[in-house]
Structure formats: C-alpha cells, structure tokens
Image: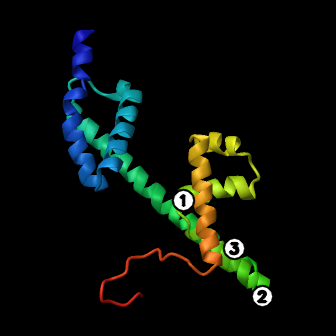
Amino acid sequence: MESKKGAFDVIGQLAALRRYARSLARNSPDAEDLVHDALVRAYERRSTFRSGANLRNWLFAIVRNAHIDRVRSVISRGQRDSQTAQEAVSSYPAHQEHSVRLAQVREAFMLLPEEQREALHLVAVEDLSYQEAADILDIPVGTLMSRVSRARAALRDFESGRRKPNHLKLVGGDND
C-alpha cells in the first residue's frame, strides 16, 4: 500500500505544476484554479495512471488539457454571446424610437461584466428572489445584492449619459 501511495504523491510536484500553470494562464489566480482543477481530474482518474510511468509528465498533460478546455470554453462563450447579441439586434427591427432605445439598453446590458449581468438577469428578468439567485450562482446573498446594485448603477449611468468608458484612454492620444 505504501509503494502505491508513494507512486501517486503529487505534493512534490505542486511547485512545478504551479509554474507551468502560471506560464499557461498568465496570472496567479487563474493558475491556481488551473492547478486545482488539474489535481481534481488527476485524483478522479488516478486509476488510469500506469504504475512506473512519469507522474510529473502525466500531471503536466492534465494541466495542459485543463487549460485547453478553459480556453475553448471562453472562446465558445464569447461566440455564443456575440451570436446572441447579433440575433437579438436583427430580430427586433428599429422601426420606432422605443425599439432603438431598447436596443441601446440591451447593448449596455451586454457590456456589463459577466458577474453583474448574470446576477441582474436572474433577479430582474427571471424574477427570482435574491436568495434563489444567490443559490443558483453559489454566492452569498450580500454578494449577489452588491452585483445587482452595481449593474443597476451602471445602467442608470448609461441612461443619464454618464456612461463610463470600458476601454483605456491613451494619455495624449485619441479616445478611439
């Protein structure tokens, strides 16, 4: 039993896994999440690890595959969001002034950070209680309330014309 456990000792590989994940993810928080996800996958699939094989290489492959899955997920989510926004704009022709305004508000909503957008959607559009929405998002109710509040404030700023720029401004450059 000891030799089997010793062959699957990942603690000694953590520093190398973190370095590799950092080079893939380019920032520490995402790298830590990547290592965590990879270790969970490794533990779940430990029966597929061949005795005598190189544990470090096996773990590196899992970290890489987890990273690829994350990148694909982000790209897929972006494509879905873009496609949804395009379909929403094309499905409601702006023949009247309120239709144009609705499209502008929809665009402002889509520009909100994802966390705020999903919180506001669940509470305002789906008409869920704060507790129900917090349970779905697996966050505390106070965090949900804060996200909804910030989202509503951003939309109010948009309505009043105080829309905050969502891009960087070059000092001495154009604001394009």
- Residue named by callout 3: 88
Is 2 left, or right, of 175 in this rendering?
left
* Pointer 2 with pointer 1, Cβ within 8 A: no
**Colour scheme used in the picture?**
rainbow
Give the CA distance from mark 3 to mark 2: 17 Å
- What's the residue at 80%, 88% (across, down)? 96
Q: Is residue 16 left or right of residue 172?
A: left
The answer to whether 97 is drawn above or below residue 73 in the figure is below
Q: Quadrant of the C terminus?
A: bottom left
Task: Give the left or right position of residue 91, taking residue 165 as reference.
Answer: right
Q: Residue at x 37, y 90 (%)?
A: 174
Image location of residue 152, percent across then percent down: 64, 63
Q: Residues within 10 Å of mark 3 (few under 14, many from 20)?
A: some
Q: For the residue marked with disc 3, what is the amino acid? A: Ala
User: Any mark on residue 97, and which?
Assistant: 2
Q: Secondary structure at mark 3?
A: helix
Residue 86 makes an appearance in the image:
no
Look at mark 1 in the image and give the residue it sits on: 114
Q: Position of residue 113 (x, y in %)?
A: 52, 62
Using the rendered view, name the quadrant where residue 71 is placed: bottom left
Residue at the spot 69% in from the left edge and 73% down from the top edge = 88
Measured in 3D between alpha carbons, the distance from the residue under mark 2 to the one under mark 1, in whole angstroms, is: 28 Å
* First reached walking from the N terminus: tag 1 or tag 3: 3
Instruction: Where is residue 51? Give x, y as percent.
Output: 25, 23
If the image is split into quadrants, where does the N terminus sit?
top left
